[in-house]
Every structure is written in C-alpha cells, then in structure tokens.
Image: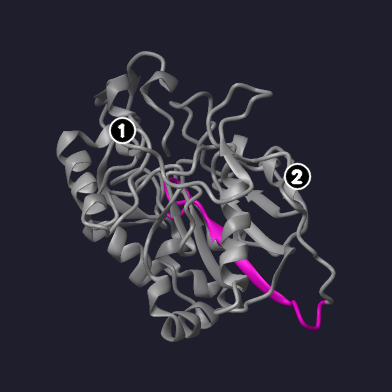
Amino acid sequence: ESEGAEDIQGDSQAEAGGESMAADDFRGSSPIGFGNDWAESEASEAAAGGLAPEGGLGMNPPAVPAGYSWGNASTGEDGAVPSDDTEPEDDTDDESTCGACLCVFDIDRTLTGVQGDTRHCPGNRVMPFYDAGYAGGKATLSALASQGISSTFCNKCYLGITSAGAGSGARSEWNHYILDHIMTGEVQDAFVAQFPEAKTWSYGMDVRSPYVLSQPDTQKQHAVELIRQWYGANERAVCIKPSNIYFFGDRTENIKPFEEKGINSQEISCGSRDMRYRRGLIGRCGARPEEIKRRAGNHLCAN
C-alpha cells in the first residue's frame, strides 16, 4: 500500500516479459502517488463537504478523535496513536450479549494481486478498472475477492477495510466496485440495508464508516479499534469484543501490532510473496479463501 518510492531500491525486473520497472513505478497506492489531478479532485470534494482530505496532499490531515494524537513520541514515527490519557473501554460484556464478529481486510495484495498477473496467480481475475496501487494497472481480484468473502466464515461477520492506500480514489469506479461487490456477505448486506450510509469511505483516524483508507502501516490496529467503536455506537448498537475481530493483510509489519489491542490478525498471501519489494515484505497474488481462518492470536506466514 502507501509505502513510498524510497522503499524500492533501484529498478526491478518484472517476472513476466522481462519488462523493467523503475523505482518510481512503486509509488504505492497512497494519494501522494496519484498526481496533481487526483489531489485537486479530492481537495475539491473535501471543500464541497463530501470527503475528508487525506494526508500527503498538502492539506490538513483528517480530524483525530478525542483520546488520539498524530505521531509517536517514543519512536518518532508518523501515524495516529492513542494518547496516554485514553480511557480503557469496558469489555465485560458476556458472549451472549456481545457475540458479533468483525472481519477487516487490507486492499492492495490482499483483496487484490499484482495488476494483470494471472500467469503466476491463476486464481486471480482481471477487471476493467484502473487500480492505482503500487505500479498501477488493471485491477486484479485476488482469489479471495474473486470467489467472494461470503465463501469464508466472514459471511456471518460484519466487515471492514483498513488500508494504507486509497485504491484509485473514493469516487473511482474501482473503489465503488470494492464496496458494491467485494464487501458483501450475509450479515454485512443486512446491516447495509438497514444503514445505507455505512457504504462510504473514511480516512485515517476520522472513522465515520467501516471502510478506512490512508491509515499508515504499523498503525492500522488503531483504525480497526475505531471501526469496532463505530459499529457499537448507540444508533447501530452492534457489540463486538476485540477478541472477536479478525484482521487479514499481506504486509508483514502490520500483523504483530494488533496484539496490543487484543485483536486477532493474520498475514495472508503466504504462498506468493513479491520478492521485488524488500525481500517479500508484501504479497503477490493476494489472499486465498482457505487462508481466511477464525484463529485467535497474531499469525505471520513465517509461523
């Protein structure tokens, strides 16, 4: 997702056709890499009151909810992190009254694979939309997204997204397709029918829906906790315990941080890693349905 060109050292060789890919091609799916036209479009939408602006566009970052702040004083890293005075939530509800589950997914190389690559990823499916993630190209569904989240245990859970990237922009055809055709399941469809306003995008720590873009890597656990709280707000009243949340993502560094929140997390695309990018830090083909398991704990491919 939004990793930045500096993460790529030198030019890389694409495996298919020997095509050379410059480091600048791997700008990530962050708004930073979309160019001025995209930034101006999103800025206009924000000014019209339709969308919260994303960081990295020369605009102010999204509003941070009470109890959170931008930056990590102890590490010097960017990102939204809880302030020291955050009040712990009461998690004493018993399972009979708080038994809902929540599945949250990354986008790039989780719901998608390398754009256009079905030779190495035969279970993937190329779509007629532009996907700005990483090098950019035709959106290509992972085997999971192609077969459907409803083919997994998440069919009976509420759904969410937390991505460091932004797809191709909130108003793009690709992003509309994600919400309309990928984020579906028995429980989620019933919920959206009751709360249609849920089918919209949020940014960073300004969580106003269960689908969050532009939340930095290694900080996704904070946005996922806010998604849980969003579902549990009075008007929706969906009680989800942290131990009933399952995050699935391809990027190795995003898995272990969920432990601090008591949220389950699992690295996927374990059988296909993109070795052109920091020795396989990210997936290649994306998630497969059989990788979506209801497992407690925080699990890396190496485990």
Snapshot quadrant of residue 197: bottom left
- Magenta-colored span: 95-111
- The amino acid on which the numbered mark 2 sits, given as a three-letter code, is Glu
Q: Nearer the viewer, residue 224 or 17?
A: 224
Residue 32 has which mark?
Answer: 1
Q: Position of residue 114 (x, y in %)?
A: 36, 43
Vertical comparison of 51 with 255: above or below: below
Count numbered badges in the picture: 2
Name which residue lies at 58% across and 70% down. Answer: 231
Q: Which residue does the image show at 23% across and 56% down from the upper left?
A: 172
Q: Quarter of the image containing the N terminus?
A: top left
Q: Which residue is at the front of the view, 39 or 235?
A: 235
- Residue occupied by mark 2: 260
Residue 220 place in picture, x, y as percent? 57, 45
The dot on residue 209 is none
Q: Is residue 3 left or right of residue 264?
A: left
Rounded to the nearest angstrom, the CA distance separating label 2 from label 1 is 29 Å
Q: Residues within 10 Å of mark 2 (few under 14, many from 20)?
A: few
Instruction: Give the structural element (helix, strand or loop) at label 1.
Output: helix
Looking at the image, is mark 2 or mark 1 earlier in the sequence? 1
Snapshot quadrant of residue 133: top left
Q: Residue at x 62, y 48 (%)?
A: 221
Q: Position of residue 17 (x, y in %)?
A: 25, 31
Please check the rendered image and state whether residue 99 is part of the magenta-colored stretch, yes or no: yes
